[in-house]
Image (spheres, rainbow, N blue to C red):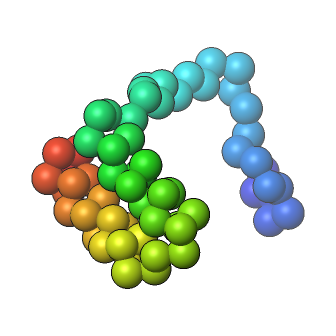
Protein backbone atom coordinates (compact mmCIF):
# COMPACT_ATOMS: atom_id res chain seq x y z
CA UNK A 1 0.00 0.00 0.00
CA UNK A 2 1.29 3.48 -0.86
CA UNK A 3 1.96 5.72 2.13
CA UNK A 4 2.72 9.30 1.15
CA UNK A 5 4.13 9.96 4.62
CA UNK A 6 6.65 7.12 4.58
CA UNK A 7 10.18 8.46 4.93
CA UNK A 8 12.05 5.22 4.30
CA UNK A 9 11.76 2.50 1.72
CA UNK A 10 9.83 -0.58 2.76
CA UNK A 11 12.07 -3.38 3.94
CA UNK A 12 11.88 -6.82 2.45
CA UNK A 13 14.49 -8.46 4.64
CA UNK A 14 16.69 -9.31 1.66
CA UNK A 15 17.86 -5.87 0.53
CA UNK A 16 21.61 -5.61 -0.03
CA UNK A 17 23.42 -2.53 -1.37
CA UNK A 18 24.78 -2.94 -4.89
CA UNK A 19 28.31 -2.34 -3.70
CA UNK A 20 29.89 -0.98 -0.59
CA UNK A 21 31.64 2.38 -0.77
CA UNK A 22 35.40 2.23 -1.11
CA UNK A 23 38.08 4.56 0.15
CA UNK A 24 38.76 7.60 -2.04
CA UNK A 25 41.55 7.22 -4.58
CA UNK A 26 44.90 8.95 -4.07
CA UNK A 27 43.96 11.70 -6.53
CA UNK A 28 40.72 12.43 -4.66
CA UNK A 29 42.53 12.54 -1.33
CA UNK A 30 45.20 14.93 -2.65
CA UNK A 31 42.64 17.27 -4.23
CA UNK A 32 40.50 17.27 -1.07
CA UNK A 33 43.54 17.98 1.10
CA UNK A 34 44.55 20.94 -1.08
CA UNK A 35 41.00 22.30 -0.96
CA UNK A 36 40.68 21.83 2.82
CA UNK A 37 44.01 23.60 3.35
CA UNK A 38 42.92 26.49 1.12
CA UNK A 39 39.64 26.81 3.05
CA UNK A 40 41.55 26.74 6.34
CA UNK A 41 43.78 29.57 5.09
CA UNK A 42 40.79 31.50 3.77
CA UNK A 43 42.02 31.30 0.17
CA UNK A 44 38.73 31.25 -1.72
CA UNK A 45 40.41 31.33 -5.13
CA UNK A 46 42.38 28.12 -4.58
CA UNK A 47 39.42 26.47 -2.80
CA UNK A 48 37.18 27.17 -5.80
CA UNK A 49 39.86 25.98 -8.21
CA UNK A 50 40.21 22.72 -6.28
CA UNK A 51 36.45 22.19 -6.49
CA UNK A 52 36.74 22.55 -10.27
CA UNK A 53 39.73 20.20 -10.35
CA UNK A 54 37.75 17.62 -8.35
CA UNK A 55 34.89 17.79 -10.83
CA UNK A 56 37.26 17.22 -13.74
CA UNK A 57 39.00 14.40 -11.87
CA UNK A 58 35.72 12.66 -11.07
CA UNK A 59 34.59 12.81 -14.68
CA UNK A 60 37.94 11.65 -16.05
CA UNK A 61 38.76 8.89 -13.56
CA UNK A 62 35.55 7.73 -11.87
CA UNK A 63 32.93 7.71 -14.59
Rendered residue at 46%/76% (across/down) = 43
Rendered residue at 33%/52% (across/down) = 31
Outermost residue, top side: 14
Left or right: residue 30 compared with residue 16: left
* Residue 49 visible from this viewpoint: yes
The answer to whether residue 9 is above or below residue 18 is below
Residue nearest the observer in this picture, 58 or 12: 58
Number of residue marks = 0
Rendered residue at 42%/71% (across/down) = 47
The answer to whether residue 33 is above or below residue 18 is below
Location of residue 26 (image quadrant): top left
Location of residue 62 (image quadrant): top left
Left or right: residue 38 compared with residue 13: left
Outermost residue, front side: 41
Rendered residue at 80%/65% (across/down) = 4
Outermost residue, bottom side: 45
The answer to whether residue 5 is above or below residue 13 is below
* Residue 18 visible from this viewpoint: no
Residue nearest the observer in this picture, 14 or 42: 42
Outermost residue, left side: 60
Amino acid sequence: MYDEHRTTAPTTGSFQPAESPSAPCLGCREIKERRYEAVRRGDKTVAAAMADVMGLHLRAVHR
